[in-house]
Each structure stands twice: as structure tokens, then as C-alpha cells.
Amino acid sequence: ASVDPGDPFDVTLTITNEGQASAGDVSIRINTSSDAITLGDPENYYIPELDPGESSVLNLTFETDTAAPLGLTPIVVDITYRSAELETFRQAATIGVPIVGRAEMGIASIRTDPVRITAGSPVDVTIRLENTGTADAKSVRATIDDIPLAGTKESFLGTIEPGNDAPAVFALDADRAGAFDYTLTIEYVDDYG
């Protein structure tokens, strides 16, 4: 239904003679309109003859660049054939390929302020979240769970574009000494919802 930038995809192209007479010397040329999409198969195909109602199936494989622009990218299919009276006809069709990016969140760094934490003092935990995907991560929200310290345990970051990062800051009260494990949960919405 959609393609992530950098992923391969397959297209099954069915050529059908919907006319009343045979079509001969059927030539099919596949033309990708974008440099971000390349055909992994030959660009040209030949079918000697298609009788009325007969079909021929082409299974095509395409590759996409990781920098492929998001949106609907057309692939043009040029078909040339001869009628029973040897008259040449040309027909063009378009395959629309929806390229939809996917956000991927990761942790770029974790920092505490102050670096040396003493019991009974406040501490800020800053976790930089990085979008390593190909689409915007929208409505990014980070929460830390299972930590027995009081304070702000949720941070709203908004939108993080691909290749960028943003800080999630948690203001906690270190009211006791010890090492505390916690779970970081990152929620966001991308083009896939």
C-alpha cells in the first residue's frame, strides 16, 4: 500500500488486450520519473501478440533511495502496439507509488545536572531523543516509569524532524540515596499513524 524510503517494492503489471482484434508487436517501456526510484529489472519488454481478452503479467522490482521524497511518485508505462491493420498505437499509463516515511526514535544521550547527585537535592535528568527515521515524529511525549523519586516524570517535545534531536527534561527530587532503574517510554505519531 505504501513504501518506506530505502525499501524495495514489487509491482505486478497486467497488460490486457481489451479490444476486438489482436494486438501485435507490443512494446512496454517502464520509465521511473524520479532518480530516487530505480527499476531492478529491464526497462523494456516485448510481447509478440495479445489476442482479444488475453493478458500478460510483468512482475517488476523497484529500489528506492533513503532520501526519496515523500508523497506520490509516478512511474510511467509507455505501451506501443500494432493493430491487425498494422497501424501503430501508443498508450501511456501511470503507476502511482505512495512513498511514506516512518519515524524512528532513539536515545542520543543521557545527562544529569548536577553530575554528582547528593541525597536530598533536586536533579534534572535530560535525555536527548533523536529521530533516525525518514518522517517527522509528531506529538512526541516521553515518560519515565518505575522510579521511586518525586518530581516531573513526563516531558512533551512536540515534533522532531528526521536527523534532529530534542531534549526530554525530567525534574526529580533525589530524596534518598541509591541507584534507581527506570523505564523510558517514548510515544509519537508518524505518517503511518
Image (cartoon, helix red, strand yellow):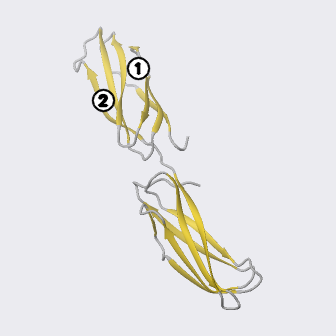
Q: Residues within 10 Å of mark 1 (few under 14, many from 20)?
A: few
Instruction: Single out the residue that lies furthest toward the right.
Output: 20
Please give the name of the residue rendered at 61% of the width and 70% of the height, measured from the top-left corner.
13
Q: Nearer the viewer, residue 89 or 11?
A: 89
Give the amino acid at mark 2.
Ile
Tell me if 98 is positioned left or right of 117 in this view.
right
Q: Is residue 69 left or right of residue 108?
A: right
Classify 169 as above or below 69.
Answer: above
Residue topped by disc 2: 110
In which image quadrant can residue 183 be found? top left
Q: Position of residue 173 (x, y in %)?
A: 34, 12
Badge 2 crowding class, 10 Å Cα cut-off, few under 14, some 14 to 19, many 20 or more, is: few
Mark 1 vs mark 2: give the one in front. 2
Q: Which residue is mark 1?
A: 147
> Residue 119 — which label?
none
Please tell me which of labels 1 and 2 falls first in the chain: 2
The residue under the point 36% across, 23% down is 169
- Quarter of the image for the N terminus: give it: bottom right
Using the rendered view, name the quadrant where residue 37 is placed. Answer: bottom left
107 vs 149, nearest the viewer: 107
- Position of residue 10 measured from the top left corner of the image (x, y, whole percent): 54, 65
Looking at the rendered structure, the secondary structure element under dot 1 is: loop
Q: Provide the secondary structure element on which disc 2 rests.
A: strand
Occupied quadrant, residue 64: bottom left
**Residue at x 52% of width, y 55% of height:** 3
Residue with the most extreme left position: 116
Whether residue 108 sits left or right of residue 6 in the image: it is left
Q: Is residue 85 above or below residue 13?
A: below
**Callout 1–callout 2 Cβ contact below 8 Å:** no
Q: Nearer the viewer, residue 97 or 108?
A: 97
